[in-house]
Image (spheres, rainbow, N blue to C red):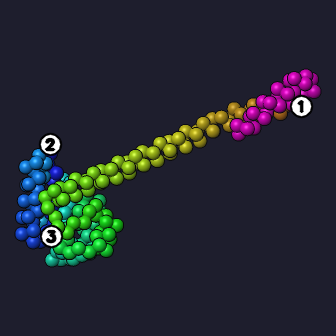
């Protein structure tokens, strides 16, 4: 099983060490994590740009930015960032809600996080991101199918109209023929009505 690659963007070495210990505790239970630590937003963005990251743990209080500005700056630098979980030293429901609305999958308060909560948050966040990606892919596939269907129907419509115009023209000519029996007139009229209905 490939380890889940976690990019921790955290300026406090003690907090980074604690997160690392929590992930190692989870490894003892059979889960595999690889922690990559960046001590600044710039270093985190650089590491993120290199690729291979499954989830980001982002501290909102970094030297070069704080609060939601940190999240916004990261997303501006890397708009297609992988799954993102926000870490904060303060409990603030408004900030938590804004972080979630801005693209974070979860908001964790550092002093309230233990190994089980951290791992659950990471796993659920990745699961939600994967489900969302699957929905986007399914929507794109449905749109491609819809465009193909529309193109097919337009082509079929064109292919039907050409011979139908000929059939309708002949039906109109036949309707003017006074030598037709009443049954033949009804048959020609049925042909004309059916053809006009298809157009």
What residue would you read off at disc 1?
A: 176
Secondary element under disc 2, as helix, strand or loop, is loop
Dot placed on the residue nearer the N-terminal end, 2 or 1: 2
For mark 3, does the 10 Å Cα neighbourhood hold few (<14), some (14 to 19), or many (20 or more) residues? few
Dot placed on the residue nearer the N-terminal end, 2 or 3: 2
What residue would you read off at disc 2?
A: 1
Q: Is residue 170 left or right of residue 4?
A: right
* Picture residue at 34% right of the left edge, 67% below the top: 101
Question: Which stretch appears magenta?
Answer: 174-199
Secondary element under disc 1, as helix, strand or loop, is loop
Q: Is residue 104 left or right of residue 57?
A: right
Closer to the eye: label 2 or 3:
3
Give yes or no for residue 25 being in the magenta stretch.
no
* Picture residue at 79% right of the left edge, 33% below the top: 192
Give yes or no for residue 184 being in the magenta stretch.
yes
* Picture residue at 93% right of the left edge, 27% below the top: 178
Secondary element under disc 3, as helix, strand or loop, is helix
The circle drawn on residue 111 is: 3
User: As rendered, which of 146 and 180 lies closer to the eye?
Assistant: 146
Q: Looking at the picture, how far across and down is residue 46, in whole percent?
A: 17, 64
Dot placed on the residue nearer the N-terminal end, 1 or 3: 3
User: As rendered, which of 110 and 132 lies closer to the eye?
Assistant: 110
For mark 1, does the 10 Å Cα neighbourhood hold few (<14), some (14 to 19), or many (20 or more) residues? few
Above/below status of 136 relative to 15:
above
Specify the quadrant that holds the C terminus.
Answer: top right
Closer to the eye: label 1 or 3:
3
Specify the quadrant that holds the N terminus.
Answer: top left
Magenta: main secondary structure equals helix
Q: Looking at the picture, how far across and down is residue 63, in whole percent?
A: 15, 77
User: Disc 1 versus disc 3: distance between alpha carbons?
Assistant: 92 Å
Find residue 184 and report its image quarter. top right
């Amino acid at each position: 099983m490939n380890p889940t690659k976690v990019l921790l963007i955290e300026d406090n070495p003690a907090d980074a060490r604690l997160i690392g210990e929590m992930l190692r505790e989870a490894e003892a239970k059979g889960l595999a994590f690889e922690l990559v630590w960046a001590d600044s937003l710039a270093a985190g963005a650089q590491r993120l740009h290199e690729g291979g990251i499954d989830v980001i743990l982002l501290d909102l209080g970094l030297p070069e930015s704080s609060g939601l500005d940190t999240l916004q700056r990261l997303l501006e630098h890397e708009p297609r960032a992988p799954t993102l979980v926000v870490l904060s030293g303060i409990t603030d429901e408004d900030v938590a809600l804004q972080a979630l609305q801005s693209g974070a999958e979860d908001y964790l308060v550092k002093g309230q996080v233990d190994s089980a909560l951290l791992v659950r948050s990471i796993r659920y966040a990745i699961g939600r991101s994967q489900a969302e990606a699957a929905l986007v892919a399914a929507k794109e596939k449905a749109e491609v199918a819809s465009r193909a269907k529309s193109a097919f129907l337009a082509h079929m419509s064109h292919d039907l109209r050409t011979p139908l115009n000929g059939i309708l023209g002949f039906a109109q000519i036949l309707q003017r023929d006074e030598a037709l029996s009443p049954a033949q007139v009804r048959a020609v009229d049925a042909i004309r009505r059916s053809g006009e209905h298809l157009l």
